[in-house]
Amino acid sequence: MHAGIAITGVSMRYSKASDSGGVIDINASIPGGKFTTLLGESGSGKTTLLRLLAGFLRPDEGDIAIQGQVVASADEFVPTQRRDLAMVFQSYALWPHMTVFENVAFGLRARKVPKPELRTRVGATLDLVGLAHLSERKPASLSGGQQQRVALARSLVLEPGLLLLDEPLSNLDADLRLQMRNQLKVLQLKTGITFVYVTHDQEEAFALSDHMIVLDQGRILQQGESSDLYTRPSSARVADFMGRGGLHVDGRASDMAGGRCTFVGGTSPSGPHRDLGSFPHWETTLVPSQEAQLVVHSEDLYLCAPGQRDEGSPTFAGRVETVNFAGRENHVDIRLADGQTVTAYEDVTHRRKMGDEVAVGFDRERAWIFGLRGADRKQAEALDSNSPPPLRAAAAAGAHVLGQRSKKARTSDERVG
Amino acid sequence: MTLAKDPTLTAPEEVTSARPGRRRVLPGTDISVWAIWALTVVAVFFLVAYPVARIVWLSVSDARTGTFDTSVFTSQLSSPGMWRAAWNTLVMAAAAMLVGALAAVPMAWLCERSNMPGRKAVTSLVFLTFMNPPLLLGLAYIMIFGPNIGVLTGTLSWFGIDSTIYSWWGLILVTACASFAIIFMTTSASLAGIDGDLENAARAHGATTQEIAFRISLPLVRPAVASGCLLSFVLALNAFGVQALIATPARIPLLTTEIYSYFSYPVQFSAAASQAVVLIGLSLLATLAANAYILSRTFPTIAGKGAKVEVTSLSTAGRAIAAVLCFAVVSASVVVPMTIVILSSFVKTPGAGFGLPNLWLGNYRQLIELGEVGSSLWNSLRLGLVAATLMVLLALSLTYFRRRKMRGSRFVFSLAEVPFVIPGIVLAVGFIAGYSQRPLNLYGTATILVLAYVSKFLPIATRFTDNAQGQISDELEEAVYAHGGTRGQAFRRVLLPLMKRGLVTAAVLSFVFAFNELSASILLIGTGTQVASTVLLHYSQEGLVGPMNAFAAVLFLITALCYVTVIAIAGRSVVKAST
């Protein structure tokens, strides 16, 4: 039986300053034997949460139980080495003075596994990751991908109840990333070990995980099965996080009945409001006439000629800002009338130019309506009033942009988060 | 050395993740870990806090009755002689520091940023200067510019100088030679740490080499230069060998030599302590000034391993001039004096030249016949070894706990660095004050020497252990715990093997400094605990020129041997690591 984890009311701050990072009041359960991802931007607290699970940090409040055993609480603390876990570090943290074999054998030696068994198990694990032929090499003479697999082998050989992975793929180049990603998934399925995986890359998260916990500013935004999170985000923030930004329309919802509602809105609070039609919605907190926001992912937007009024869907007029050729599709940035910039993906056969008038449309069934709660509203207002329009788009693109930008600063930034 | 904390000195090689303000959880912290920490705290207390506190108390108490009595202190403070000595000391150290900085900063720039030939040789020789004891330098300069026997004394009159080495210029020149190396070392470490792109950016925006040097590089290394200057100021105060050999015959009273004279019969403890307090005040003032300067001019932007720096191509003439000047400096600070020391050890009649008929081995025979050489060398050797071992262990513990953010570790760590800015002779007064009464009467024993050495040179050892640990990322240790390893296993199987080089380097350097130590030893030796440096000083004061020269040559060879060992183990980068 592999370890499920229960996290109850866990808080941990690095210092008293309110913006010092850490996590606040985390309640989560991580299913045993599954692949769970902690997803968030840098500074969201995902790495802190992982380090709390590992036992490198001690919570200020709350309990953590791994497979029913409390490992951290107000009066109990089980140190890392007694938690039956293993960890793959972002930097791999291979011991540079030991050979590949010695690195992988370390944990077994610490557990006093007899020599013959140790040899077989290390050999088998190195075979599993395809590195048996390099067992006498030192880590420094290996490529990034090979080091990554040594780090993985070092953890897997212990057959731990729980495997923690801290952005293990972030130092690899794109091709290798994809390859290792698949291998990770296969290994998890094969071994049935509980994987807890930290990443800021939502694509990676979807590709890998059964279960997902989305964090933002030290709090959990949403948790659940990955497919649910994509199709049914609980807030505009999560929706932004799941996709690659997209269209945001402020307005009001009304006529809730049978899981549908009518949404009235313009592209800005002050702009002319119009009835955009009937949308599906499932959020129980949404009340009639409450301020609400409509969100559509970029991948669900399409472009059409201006003025062309599609029967099935509302459209918004705008002007093409940039067209980026990205291989099998074009990424088209459109500046809408209210100033927000949205990105749409389009077949390369379309030839749009900068300054072209276009309209952005979408399928109503693929849009979400969220009630604006206090925090969301504040954020929306801040974006409206403080940021020049292009920045707003960048902020909406959220995870992706931030993820790219923070890569270099990660060693210092990311660990805090 | 955190007293003159300069982030640029340590930042470039740090790989430790900075987790703000949070005490690291110490997994598996059990009683043995606490015991080691407690032992460390106690050691630092008895090595630093207690002796320093005793000096201050001694200065304001009656040495015989042990009651509060400020009469000696106030009479000292109102004595013009004391103020003259204090002023002389300040002038000597400050002038040597200035001369040293004028030579060291351009040299560091040339060695780090230009294609001057012989950069590596210059860097290595500066480091040898750093390890070489000032006493030997003093002896050598007397052989060069001293009255009667001086090889070059005659040439001085060509330049219209009718004084000998026994003068203000002699004192400042030799002190500068003995103390400038540290400025070179801090400056070049800081230059090496600057992200090359900062200079490249200036170049890309049309700046000339000169503008880059004066408007980008030098402003960025100012904090490092300042902390190097402070350390050189302190080393100048510490060069007791030079002061005893040159200032005393030149009739320049200094606080250090005055303190020494209070210990000849009749011993005046309180007067010595009062002057020691004034000397601490001088160091403290220098430290505060340096810190104020450094804090106001430290830029956080230069940490990080960025692009490679562009080396400035000098013209052929420029390269030649630069090389000649740099080699002139290291010639003056180590090459010529030490050559003279070695040659003189074979000279029969001093002052009669180095011709073959004037050479013999008689000096060495006389040295052996005097009989003290064996026991004093043995004393220096074993005290040095014991002290070095203790220093490294203590330094290891201090850095281990500080890097794991143990409660109070930062304070204890800083406390352990205090002795570096306290002149050795003052430290010795503290140890005498603290450990010459029951129940801790250690005066005249080997133990008190070892303790003083550990106290005085611990900051050098911690610099190396700290550096060695700073290069091991936290994750390497966490990976041990994350794979079931214990704290002991993490230490033995990961930290220790990875720190080996740094530790051995620390040990050898600690040893050589302890081995050659004079300024504290001079007050702390007993009849059975003569050490090499005190015997050498004694020979020179007694005018035993032949054996003195032979002994000086022996001490230099031992120092050079340690130097070669350090370079072999740690490579030339040790020059930058030791700041």
Image (cartoon, rainbow, N blue to C red):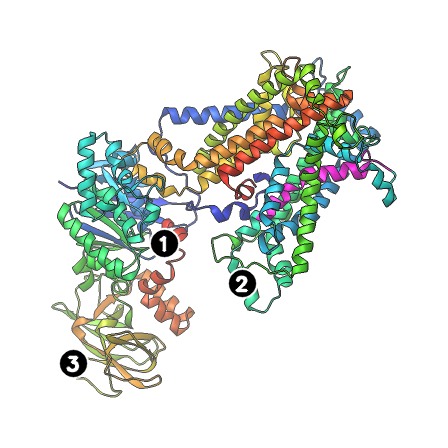
Q: CA distance from mark 1 to mark 2?
A: 32 Å
User: Are labels 3 and 1 assigned to the same chain?
Assistant: yes
Residue A4 seen in render: no
B448 shown above or below A341: above
The residue under label 3 is which amino acid type?
Answer: Gly
- Residue B116's spot in the image, x, y percent? 62, 54
Q: Which residue is mark 2?
A: B200
Q: CA distance from mark 2 to mark 3?
A: 58 Å
Extreme residue in the left direction: A258
Q: Which residue is mark 3?
A: A312
Viewer-closest of B367 and A125? B367
The residue under label 1 is which amino acid type?
Answer: Gly
In the structure shown, which secondary structural element does the residue marked by tag 3 occupy? loop
Q: Residue at x 41, y 26 (%)?
A: B34
Asked if the magenta segment contains residue B174, the reply would be yes
- Residue B336's spot in the image, x, y percent? 70, 39
User: Are labels 2 and 3 assigned to the same chain?
Assistant: no
Q: Nearer the viewer, mark 3 or mark 1?
A: 1
Callout 2: 10 Å neighbours few (<14), some, many (20+)?
some
The residue under label 2 is which amino acid type?
Answer: Asn
Q: Quadrant of the N terminus of chain A?
A: top left
Residue B455 seen in render: yes
Answer whether labels 3 and 1 touch (C-beta < 8 Å): no
Quarter of the view holding residue A288: bottom left
Magenta residues, start to end: B163-188
In the structure shown, which secondary structural element does the residue marked by tag 1 occupy? loop
> What chain does mark 1 sit on?
A
Q: Which residue is mark 1?
A: A43
In the structure shown, which secondary structural element does the residue marked by tag 2 occupy? helix
Callout 1: 10 Å neighbours few (<14), some, many (20+)?
many
Callout 3: 10 Å neighbours few (<14), some, many (20+)?
few
- Residue B378's spot in the image, x, y percent? 59, 18
